[in-house]
Amino acid sequence: MSADICQKTSKNRMLWIDSLKAIAVSWIFLTHFIQSSFLNWGINFSWGTIGSKILYGISGKYAVSFFCVFLGYLAAQSKNKNIVDRIVHRYLQFCIPLLLVSSLQYVIYYFQNSVSKRDVFLIPSISFLFESNMLCAQAWCISFFFSASVIIYLLNEKKHRILFMLFLSVLFLFYQRLWISICLFGAIIYHVSQLSFFKNFIKQMSKNKLLFSALKICLLVVAYLIIRFPENDTTYLLDGVSASIILLVCLYSPLIQKILSFPSLLHKTGFISFEIFLLHPMFYCLTNNLIFSRIKYDPNSRLTFLFAFVFAYLTVWLFAYLMSKLLKSKYNKKIYSFVDQIIPNLS
C-alpha cells in the first residue's frame, strides 16, 4: 500500500485533502465567529461542559497548522524545473488574492468612516509585502507560507533534502518562525513517503491489517492528546506535529480518503478555502454590525446563533466562490502570461 492511492480529480487534486481544508477553514470561521461576535449566544465553551472537554485544544491556530502541513506536502510535489517560475507563480498566488481582499475591505471601511484616504497605502503593504494590518488581519501567516514555499522549492531537487529540511525546521524554531517549520513538516512527510525503505515498511505493515489499523488508531490518539494544552508557541508546535500525524495516517488509510472524497460540497469548499480564509473576518463582522445589531434577538437563543452562523458562512462562501472564479478569469491569466514572458530574462 502506498501514498499513490490518493483519491484525485481530473485536475490531479487530492479530494480528501481539499475536504480536510474545508473542515479546517470552517472551524477557523466558527471559532472566530463565536469569539468576536456572538460570545453569549447560548454557546458555552467553558471547561465545565462535556463538549468543551472534547474540543479543548482544537483551536483556530490548530486548523491553520493543517494548512501549513498541506502546503508543505503539496509544494514538495512540484515538478516544475524552473525555480524562478515556481517562486514567482507562488508569489502571485498570494499577492493577487490579498490585493482583492484588502481593496474590498478598504472600500467597506471607507463607507463606514473607519479609515482615511491615506490608509489606502496599507493595501500595497498587505498585497505585496504580506504585512498584516486592519485591512486583512489574516495576512499574518502569508509571509510564512510564501517563505516556506520558496525553501521547499529550492530544496526539492537536493540530494539530502530531507536532512536539510529537518535542520531548517529546528533552526526556524529557534528563530521563532515555527509556522515555517510546520510547513516543512509536510514536505518532509512527502519526501520520506517516497523513500524505498519507507515504502517497503508500509508494505510489510499493511500485510497485517489488524496491527496496521491499531497503529494508525494509536497515532490518531497521540495526535489528539498532544494538543490539549493552553495556547502558546510550544502548543502551536505540537499542533503542527498533530496535523502532520493526521496527514500521515490519512495517506495510508484508503477508507478515510474515500469518506472524505465523497461529499462534493466539502471538497469544493476546500478548493476555495484560501479565499474563505482571507474573506471570513469581514463577513462575520458585517453580519454582526450591519444586520444583527439592528434587529431584536434573544441573546441566549441557539436558533438565533445557528441562523447567524449559517447566514454569515453562506455569504462568505458565495463571495469566496466568486473570487475564485475571478482568479481564474482571462484577466488573471493575462497577468500570469505577462509574467511568464519576463521570467526567462530573470532566469
Image: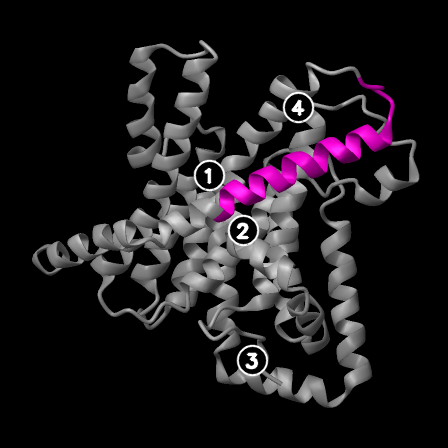
Q: Residue at x 47, y 75 (%)?
A: 10
* Residue 328, horizontal then vertical, whole percent: 36, 54
Residue annotated with mark 4? 36
Residue topped by disc 1? 141
Would you say 155 lies left or right of 67 here?
left
Residue 211 is drawn in which quadrant?
bottom right
Dot 4 crowding, Cα within 10 Å, few <14, some 14–19, many 20+: few
Of tags 4 and 3, the one toward the viewer is: 4
* Direction left: furthest residue: 345
| Residue 140: percent from left, percent from top | 46, 33
The answer to the question of whether label 3 and label 2 lie on touching residues, with beta carbons closer than 8 A, is no
Say whether residue 246 is left or right of residue 48: left
Q: Residues within 10 Å of mark 1 (few under 14, many from 20)?
A: some
Marks 1 and 3 close (CB-CB < 8 Å): no
Count neighbours of disc 3 (C-alpha within 10 A) and say few if under 14, some if 14 to 19, many if 20 or more: few
Residue 67 numbered tag: 2
Is residue 46 visible to the viewer in this orientation of the structure?
Answer: no
Distance of label 3 from label 2 (alpha carbons):
25 Å
**Tag 4 secondary structure:** helix
Cα separation, mark 1 vs mark 3, equals 32 Å
Identity, as a three-letter code, of the amino acid under mark 1:
Cys
Task: Evaluate if marks 2 and 4 touch, with contact meaning CB atoms under 8 Å apart.
Answer: no
Neighbourhood count class around disc 2 (C-alpha, 10 Å): few under 14, some 14–19, many 20 upward: many
User: Mark 4 or mark 1, which is nearer to you?
Assistant: 4
Q: Earlier in the sequence, mark 4 or mark 1?
A: 4
Q: Position of residue 166 (x, y in %)?
A: 46, 59
Discs 4, 1 touching: Cβ within 8 Å: no
Q: Magenta segment range?
A: 297-321
- For the residues labelled 4 and 1, the Cα–Cα distance comes to 19 Å
Q: Which residue is mark 3?
A: 198
